[in-house]
Image (cartoon, grey):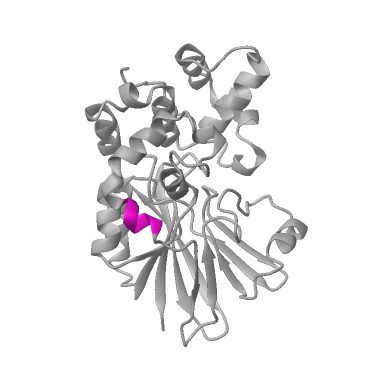
Amino acid sequence: MTRLAILSDIHGNFPALEAVIKDMESFEPDHVIVAGDSINGAPFDVQIMECIVNRGWTAIRGNHEFYLLDYGTPREREHMRHSRSATWLNETLKDWFAYIAAMPDELTLYYRDGPPVYITHGLPGNPDNAIMRVTSDEQIASWLNGVEQSIFISGHYHLSVERHVDRWHILNPGPVGALMDGTRDASYLLIEAAGDCWHATFRHVPYDFTLVDAAFKQQKLLDLLGLEGLLKFEQLRRARPTIQPFKRWMQAHYPNEGRSFPRAYEYLSLPLEAVWDTLGKGYLVNPDLPLPPADFPDG
């Protein structure tokens, strides 16, 4: 019986990945597949790439790999053109550019004891969007209309998903490095072949966030990345979406102001109930889990 581990959205969080590797040991998967966004989030991108290559895992690209590959080209996304994190990412991974440039954007797995499995980061041909827990069946059927395989696995959405829509069994392992459910765990997926289907088991694993905290401070990422660094750090620390919700809150409360550290501190100091509406309906989970007290890194 083939057993696979499916990881996604590691986002440079090596302490989280180490916890997942340790958890996987008892299951002895036949192979490990990473469904994109291995980089850009926590400050361990090089260690992540070394781990993927040295362990012989199969990895595809997500939108964050394209933030690296499209840097300084006409393809670069508008919101990344003046991003300090894009510059930092390019400098950090300059020795890995050629490898990442040759990675695939999707995979189809053909194992003898299970049906073919289609894996991409977001949607087919679109790494910037994803099936969410709240996405309608009609929308999903429209997006997957051209997908022949009955098993569809993707990442990008930072919560785990299991849906059955028409002929598709839809799975998202959830992110290893940036779970957005308030628990600050690492998430991944095990699938086991069973003839005409694959059985899915979702795993959530705690990890030592103090190692991430220490790396942000040691590398002085607030100085290097500015407001982007603060929001990335808080997104990991809070285990809740922060970057887009802050933009929504600014538009609602200070539409004529540019984003700034004082406004970010104001937003990040609000209780969960005050920011709930800014999270987006796809992330309204675990309302009883409080936000950690504000404890912003120096910068």
Count of numbered tags:
0
Q: Residues in magenta?
A: 97-101
Residue at figure coordinates x 37%, y 55% from the top left: 100
149 in relation to 6, above or below: below
User: Could you tell me residue 244's position as x and y percent?
Assistant: 56, 32
206 in relation to 297, above or below: below
Residue 41 sits inside the magenta stretch:
no
Residue 99 sits inside the magenta stretch:
yes
Q: Is residue 41 visible?
A: yes
291 in relation to 60, above or below: above
204 vs 139, left or right, is left
Q: Quadrant of residue 211 in the image?
A: top left
Residue at figure coordinates x 56%, y 63% from the top left: 171
Residue at figure coordinates x 45%, y 30% from the top left: 83
Quarter holding the C terminus? top left
Majority SS type along the magenta span: helix
10 vs 201, left or right, is left
Q: Nearer the viewer, residue 93 or 163?
A: 93
Q: Is residue 208 visible?
A: no
User: Could you tell me residue 194's position as x and y percent?
Assistant: 51, 83
Q: Residue lying farthest front? A: 74
User: Could you tell me residue 116's position as x and y percent?
Assistant: 54, 79
230 vs 212, left or right, is right
Q: Quadrant of residue 213 in the image?
A: top left
Quarter holding the N terminus? bottom left
Residue at figure coordinates x 49%, y 31% from the top left: 290
